[in-house]
Image: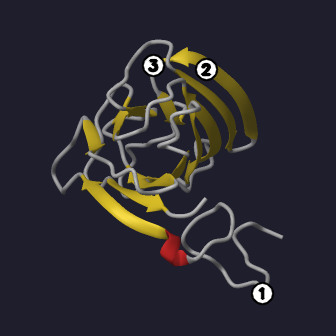
Amino acid sequence: MSPILDSIGSVKAYGWGAFSSPYAFESIATGTVSAGNTSSVITFSSIPSTYAHLQLRMFARATAQNTMFVRFNNDSGSTNYDNHRMNGAGTSVGVDARINYSALFVSSKGYGIVPTANIGSAVIMDILDYTNTNKYKVTRTLSGNERNTSDGTSDIEYTSGSWKNTNAINRIDVSLQTSTLAEYTHIALYGIKGA
């Protein structure tokens, strides 16, 4: 059975992990790029430490086809993040790893976040055990877009990553590798209660 369906088959519209009450998710903050503007980074700071996990939900657009990055606690050290990816695009598939990197990939394929008019990329990133100071922080991300083209550029991707640091996460920066976030980008940060 799909993890999105419960035992009686009703759809849960609030996440893609283990079963939980919809009330387990609480909105912490949102960041939006308004019409006619761009942004080089969206930052969530002073994140409360009262949840078990965090989740980022994104609708993202870029000013140029690009890879989206996430960094924790303003850490851009060149060897502090590891990334793994499985990707499907058109009729091709791919896997890769980038270890000892300076950020986590939200979409490590270059066309993951697109500039195409009226098309954005949907992203859900879970940040697990973000306050646990006895372990490195790990993430899992599902992202994708549909461009309604036959050129194989539509994309779905699953990535996992780790921030090789035991500090509690209190800041998250979302940015692009070589361009800026385009208008109508919307990123929401949620806290997840429970174990």
The residue type indicated by label 3 comes to Ser
Q: Which residue is mark 3?
A: 102
Q: Is residue 75 left or right of residue 100?
A: left
In terms of secondary structure, where does tag 1 sit? loop
N-term-proximal mark, 1 vs 2:
1
**How many numbered circles are shown?**
3
Report x, y in % for residue 189.
38, 56
Q: Is residue 86 left or right of residue 57?
A: right
The residue type indicated by label 1 comes to Ile
Q: Is residue 7 left or right of residue 110?
A: right
Q: Which residue is more in the foreground, 100 or 153?
A: 100
Q: Is residue 138 left or right of residue 62?
A: right
Up-down: is 10 above or below 35?
Answer: below
Q: Are marks 2 and 3 in contact (CB under 8 Å)?
A: no
Report x, y in % for residue 10.
69, 85
**Quarter-of-image position of residue 82:** top right
Of badges 1 and 2, the one in the foreground is 1
In space, the residues marked 2 and 3 are separated at their CA atoms by: 10 Å
Residue count near mark 2 (Cα–Cα under 10 Å), binned few <14, some 14–19, many ≥20: some
In space, the residues marked 1 and 2 are separated at their CA atoms by: 40 Å
In space, the residues marked 3 and 1 are separated at their CA atoms by: 44 Å
Residue at image position (55%, 55%) is: 146
User: Which label is found at residue 84?
Assistant: none
Residue count near mark 1 (Cα–Cα under 10 Å), binned few <14, some 14–19, many ≥20: few
N-term-proximal mark, 3 vs 1:
1
Report x, y in % for residue 136.
57, 30
Q: In the orientation shown, which residue stands out farthest toward the right?
A: 1
Report x, y in % for residue 111.
51, 36
Residue at image position (65%, 60%) is: 17
Q: Which residue is mark 2?
A: 98
Q: Which residue is mark 1?
A: 8
